[in-house]
Amino acid sequence: MITLINEEIQNLSDQECIARIRAHKERLGRELLILAHNYQRYDIVQLADYYSDSLDLARRGREAHEAKYIVFCGVHFMAQTSRVLAAPHQRVFLPNHLAGCPLSDFAEIDQAETAWEEVTQYTGADNVVPVAYVNSTVLIKAVCGRNGGTICTSANADKVFTHYLSQGKRILFMPDEHLGNNTAVKLGIPRDEIALYDPAKENGGLAPEAIRRARVILWKGHCHVHTNFTPALVDAMRQRYPDAVVLVHPECPEATVRAADLVGSTKFMSAYVEKAEAGKTIIIGTEVNHVRNLALMNPHLRILELSRSLCPNMFKINLRNLLYTLDNLGEVNEVFVKEDVRQDALKAVNRMFEIA
Ligand code: 13P
Ligand code: SF4
């Protein structure tokens, strides 16, 4: 579905768009819930009822019983998750259906089903749990739900991993190798018990023995926004700002995480900034809009980009397609998920809420 914006909206100024969006919010009251991910541009974040990380937004949507219309300013998998959690009286909208997530696209449904068959033929299905990063399509979440697994976000991956590893289970983690690897390393899993499954190869390119030995099987996939951050960039910024603290997102490669001072979800970054003393220099390695928003909202701090890395998909949401969605509420940009898929994905999402 392509989002069309009419010529009238195209010609409005930003201020006119904002005024009309505010008027819709006033008219609809609590029937309308606008959720925005931290990577949304400043104007959008300012108009949202809540802006936060993936975990928090999933919770907010679930708790907002009065909302009939949930407009999700983020990328497609986030709106799908919101749809999975929505009650029958709630409808979910994404202002631009072209706002996908290349990381989530690393795991396709047939590849995930093949991987599950290949891995379980060596381990047995009782000894391994499929866990999808929330940055995955609803079909991948449904595979996890159907097979006794769950999902996690960057904010609770360690809790979810610990839950299963402490029961002696292996984890098949899709589709971000870096979040999976950083979590496994943080939990002290030895390197020879972490395997990397490449869906383009038979058995993921792994020998049966490597699959049996692995406690965490990672999926070959990454976020291009976060693999831009290198240890060399951290070193260069430290030289310029020796007193700075460096925060990075766990989608960054392990070497970058090691070079940084702290690692955590976008909400973790916001919480750190909130508590920081005036004048502190904080260098942040994540999507540029989150860094900019934090800098704009906290002028008493010096908040700097580790380097400029934009998520072009998050950026596809703007004032004009948000206004268009609200002008035509209920008629455009709705997110649908097939009911059987939704039910399976819901099992996975609910297990996450039980665990973490
Ligand atoms: P958070 O869950 O930390 O908000 O991150 C989501 C995301 O897409 C990171 O690239
Ligand atoms: Fe996906 Fe990366 Fe954009 Fe997050 S920053 S939505 S993981 S492409």
Image (spheres, rainbow, N blue to C red):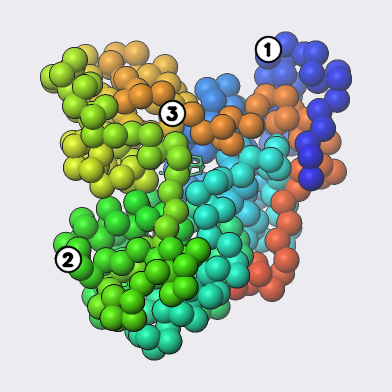
Q: Residues within 10 Å of mark 2 (few under 14, many from 20)?
A: few
Secondary element under disc 3, as helix, strand or loop, is loop
Q: Quadrant of residue 188?
A: bottom left
The three-letter code of the residue at mark 3 reads Ser
Looking at the image, do the residues carrying marks 2 and 1 touch, with CB atoms under 8 Å apart?
A: no
Give me the disc on residue 15.
Answer: 1
The three-letter code of the residue at mark 2 reads Pro
The residue that disc 3 covers is: 309
What residue sits 85% from the left and 43% below the top?
331
Q: Is residue 84 visible?
A: yes
The residue that disc 2 covers is: 190
Q: Picture coordinates of residue 297 (x, y %)?
A: 41, 20
Label 2 vs label 1: CA separation?
Answer: 55 Å
Q: Picture coordinates of residue 112 (x, y %)?
A: 53, 69
Mark positioned earlier in the residue sequence (2 or 3): 2
- Vertically, is 207 above or below 31? below
Q: Is the distance from the Cβ of mark 1 to the nearest ligand 2 atom less than 8 Å?
A: no
Q: Picture coordinates of residue 348 (x, y %)?
A: 50, 69
Q: Is the distance from the Cβ of mark 3 to the nearest ligand 2 atom less than 8 Å?
A: no
